[in-house]
Image: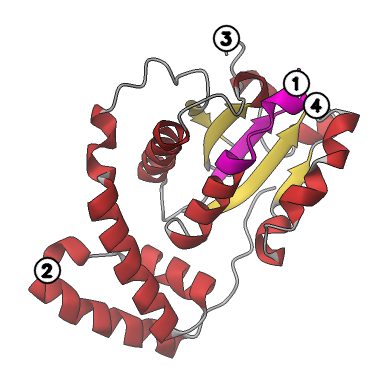
Amino acid sequence: MSSEELAPINEQDFKDLKERMKLIVEADPKQYHNDFSLRRYLRAFKTTDDAFQAILKTNKWRETYGVDKLSEMDRSQLDKKARLLRHRDCIGRPVIYIPAKNHSSERDIDELTRFIVYNLEEACKKCFEEVTDRLCIVFDLAEFSTSCMDYQLVQNLIWLLGKHFPERLGVCLIINSPGLFSTIWPAIRVLLDDNTAKKVKFVADEAELCQYLIPDILPTDM
C-alpha cells in the first residue's frame, strides 16, 4: 500500500475553478480553498459548476455549524467513541479509530455528530497534503452486537464525507468483523456510491492489517 491512485481531473476545469474562487476570495478571504482542496472538489463533483457550488455550500455550512469552534466543546463524555491517533498509516494518512462496542442508539446524535466532525477536522489538519490529503478510518467491530449499530451516525458520517469532506477518505478498514455484521452490511452498502464502497476493506487478519498500518498503533484503552 505504498501509494494512492487518484482519479484524474480536467486541468482546464481546475484553472476555471481556481479563477472563480479567486474572485470570491478577493471579496471574502474566508472563502479560500487551496489547490489540493479545489482538486478534491473537482474529483468528487466532476464539473466546474458543481464543484464551485459545493465549495460555497461547504463554506456556508462550516460557518453556520461552527466548525472552527468545535475544539471548545466538552468532549469528556465522548472520548471513548472515536479517537484521532498519534500515528499514521503506512502511506502517511492520519488515522481515526472508532470502536463499535462503545456505540449505541442511546446517545445525543447531534452532540456525537459534532464530535465526529471535530475528529475529521483535526485529522485533515494533520495531513501532509504534498504526500497525501486523505484519511484512514478504522471501524473496530470487536465485541460488536446489534445494540451497537447506530445507523443514524453512519448515515451522518457518509453525508459529511460526501458533501463537506469530499475525497478525504482514503480507506475505511473494518476489523474484527463478526459473522453477524454480514447481515447488517447490505443496509450500509446501499448508502455508499461505488467510489466510496471501493475504499471499504474488510480486514481478515493481522497480516492483512499490516498492509495498511502497524497494528500496535491501535488503542487498547477504549
Where is mark 4, residue-wise?
Answer: 206
Specify the segment rendered in magenta: 135-153
SS of the residue at dot 3? Answer: loop
| Quarter where residue 51 is shown | bottom left
Q: Earlier in the sequence, mark 3 or mark 4?
A: 4
Decide if residue 190 is on the left or right side of residue 129. right
Check residue 142 in the rendering and tell me which mark sits there, or answer none.
1
For residue 24: magenta? no
Residue 157 position within the rendered picture, expressed as x and y whole percent measured from the top left? 54, 46
Residue 103 position within the rendered picture, expressed as x and y whole percent measured from the top left? 60, 24
Residue 149 position within the rendered picture, expressed as x and y whole percent measured from the top left? 69, 32
Question: For the point 47% across and 84% down, which residue is it?
Answer: 47
Quick check: marks 3 and 4 in contact, CB under 8 Å?
no
Q: Earlier in the sequence, mark 2 or mark 4?
A: 2
Q: Earlier in the sequence, mark 3 or mark 1?
A: 1
Question: For the point 85% across and 28% down, which residue is it?
Answer: 178
Spatial CA distance of label 3 from label 1 is 13 Å
Which of the two residues, 4 or 175, is positioned nearer the viewer here?
A: 175
Decide if residue 101 is on the left or right side of residue 25. right
Spatial CA distance of label 2 from label 4 is 49 Å
Where is mark 2, residue-wise?
Answer: 28
Spatial CA distance of label 2 from label 3 is 44 Å
Decide if residue 23 is on the left or right side of residue 100. left
Spatial CA distance of label 2 from label 1 is 47 Å
Q: Callout 4: 10 Å neighbours few (<14), some, many (20+)?
A: few
Where is mark 3, residue-wise?
Answer: 221
Check residue 71 in the rendering and tell me which mark sits there, or answer none.
none
Vertical arrangement, residue 107 with respect to residue 21, above or below:
above
